[in-house]
Amino acid sequence: MKIIKKVQVKQIVTENSKAIIKERFLSQKMRLEQECQQLMFEKRKLQNKAQFSKQAAERKFQQEIDKRREEIKQVDFKLEQLDIIEIGSELIEGEVEALVEVEEGTHWDDIMKNQSIVIQDNVVIRIDK
């Protein structure tokens, strides 16, 4: 029988990967700022229409704007942390699913141990079991 198991993907920080991660964070921040600007524009546009409740529209748009501003703060924090992190450190990049063969007599603890795939500059360099 085969089961699906989550496996962590870790990345070893290099100068190259640090630059790529920073660019990704900056791109995400710029997208969020553009969304805030668009939401503010839509809010002003909607307020000029008399058929909608201005307070309800204001509240809904402000919630969305605040949500994105909070995400921007999180991205800023991640950028600060990225500047601090040392070359050679391992970052958790995400998770993938793996198929694991389970047979009678297999030790369950061996199957459920945390496994990870370690990459460096987009190349798998190690699989920790």
Image (spheres, rainbow, N blue to C red):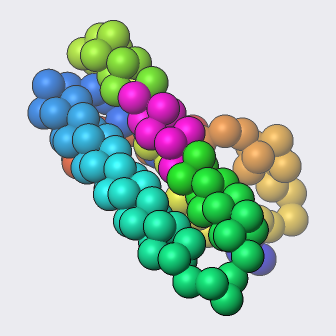
**Magenta region, main secondary structure:** helix
The one nearer the camera, 101 or 126, is: 126
Where residue 107 appears, x then y in whole percent? 83, 48
Where residue 119 appears, x then y in whole percent? 32, 41
Where residue 18 appears, x then y in whole percent? 22, 30
The one nearer the camera, 123 or 72, is: 72
The quadrant in which residue 114 appears is top right
Q: Which residue is situated farthest in the left direction here?
A: 16
Q: Can residue 7 be seen in this view?
A: no
Is residue 6 shown left or right of residue 44? right
Range shown magenta: 68-76
With respect to residue 94, does 31 lie above or below? below
With respect to residue 15, does 116 lie above or below? below
Residue at 50% x, 33% y is: 74
The quadrant in which residue 59 appears is bottom right
Residue at 40% x, 18% y is: 81
The quadrant in which residue 121 appears is top left
The one nearer the camera, 48 or 128, is: 48
Q: Is residue 46 magenta?
A: no
With respect to residue 107, does 120 lie above or below? above
In which quadrant of the rendered image does the N terminus lie? bottom right
Is residue 103 shown left or right of residue 86? right
Is residue 8 shown left or right of residue 85? right
In which quadrant of the rendered image does the C terminus lie? top right
Residue at 73% x, 76% y is: 53
Question: Number of marks in the image?
Answer: 0
The one nearer the camera, 72 or 125, is: 72
